[in-house]
Image (tube, rainbow, N blue to C red):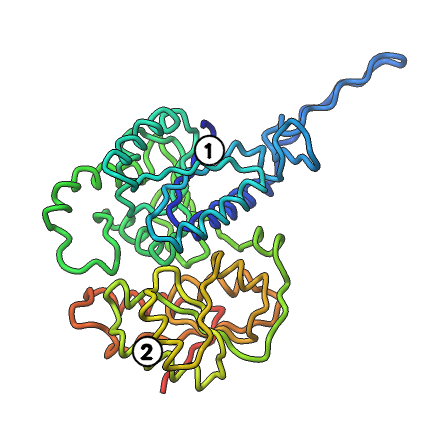
Amino acid sequence: MTGQLAFVESPVQLLNVLEWAHATARRPAPPLPAVPAQPAGGRRAAAPAPGADGGPFVVTGRGTGPVGPLAGLGLTVVVLSPTDPMSRGQLRRMAQLARDEGVAVKWQDARQGRGALASTLRELAGPLRTAERVIVGDPFSRYVQLLLTLFGPRRVTVVDDGTATMEFAAQLARGERLVRWHRRGSGRGPRELVLAPVTTLARRKLAPGRRRTVEIFTSLPVEPPPGTTVTANDFAWTRSRFGPPRLTRGADLVGTSLVETGVVDPDEYLRAVTVLARTHGATRYFAHRRESAEKLHRIAVETGLEVVRPDLPLELIARRGPVGRTIVSFPSTVVHTLPLALAGTGVKVAVCEIAPEWLRDNASPRAQGFLAGVAGTATRTERLEFG
């Protein structure tokens, strides 16, 4: 495993790694050197081998070489598998899509048993040291931060892991510790104090320097931290592989895990879902992979919505269709990604902001401002008045 090494822990991260690879493959390759003219009767110069110029190696059909439009990038994706069944199922389906594109995928059960983490670190130490570029799906991940302490990559790319990318860019620019926006308290508990040296070192490995370039590949509105490059993710791979979808007459609601992360009160959330479904004529509720079974059962019983657990990231599900002519969501990454993935289809995406009274008493003080920023910067969506 050399060349380009990606670490992902969620289906959306793997989707965005594929989007990055597709965008990289589309960039113009450097011009080939001129081939000297041959005298009459002489032998014709051999054509350069596919991918010899650094461009994408595209092979169709069955053969002995790399297969798939992204095979020439030398990209290996390491899946640091989570433990919950929904995430694992979606990741396995995304992993197969990646293999179909010519990307090597290594499945790593880094959380299975006491010795799993140590075994993972041993297995990946060598490939990490020789990788030309490392692509990170979640810079806040303790597993990724531990791996980053093993080496100093020359090129780092951070792809979207939900709205956390916005917080990562802001914290990197301010020189702050890497702390998730919904984390309550000071973040200085016993576990955080033990891991503080790891987090500090990982932050340095994720920052640009004299020997390191840092790219943020994102569909979100982020201000480039000093020394970094921000590359726009327009979901070209998704649009080229799926759809356009068939549109249904009704609306679809998109669920969120804000209840599960301790930000929003469950009763207030259910009331909001009920009002939105009635107001917009919604018939389906697309569940977030982290939503609890108990909460989803309550939504189905009390609202009459059909609860759908997608087997792929919502951007692919919506693009594949069928999908409602209107998609209503609370503040989350999809209010930025779905308009891009569904561009030209006629689907309208609307965002309903989180009211202050919905927040739990012990929610992070940053929660309201962060969520308002996620909704307020979604320029391709319609803003909803809740009532």
356 to 140, vertically: above or below: below
The relative height of residue 27 versus residue 88 in the rendered view (above or below) is: above
Q: Residue furthest left?
A: 190
Give left or right: position of 26 versus 283: right
Residue beneath the point at 16% across and 68% down: 362
Residue depicted at 54% across the width and 60% down the height: 341
* Amino acid type, mark 1: Gln
Position of 327 compared to 25: left or right? left
Q: Amino acid at mark 2?
A: Leu
Q: Position of residue 326 (x, y in %)?
A: 52, 76
Which picture quadrant has residue 343?
bottom right
Which residue is most to the right? 41
Q: Secondary structure at mark 1?
A: strand
How many numbered marks are there? 2
Residue 278, percent across and down? 44, 86
Q: Which residue is mark 2?
A: 270
User: Mark 2, residues whose alpha carbon is within 10 Å: few (<14), some, or many (≥20)?
Assistant: some
- Give the quarter of the figure containing the N terminus: top left
Quadrant into which the C terminus falls: bottom left
Q: CA distance from mark 2 to mark 1?
A: 44 Å
Nearer the viewer's eye, disc 2 or disc 1?
Answer: 2
* x then y, percent, for residue 374: 36, 65
Query: Which class describes the residues within 10 Å of circle 1: few (<14), some (14-19), or many (20+)?
Result: many
CB atoms of marks 2 and 1 within 8 Å: no
- First in residue order: circle 2 vs circle 1: 1
- The correct choice, above or below, for 272 with respect to 165 in the image is below
- Apparent side of residue 354 relative to residue 361 in the rendered image (left or right): right
**Mark sitting on residue 190:** none
Residue located at (13% from left, 41% from top): 194
Classify residue 36 by image quadrant. Answer: top right
Residue 184 place in picture, x, y as percent:
17, 60
Query: What residue is disc 1 on?
Result: 4
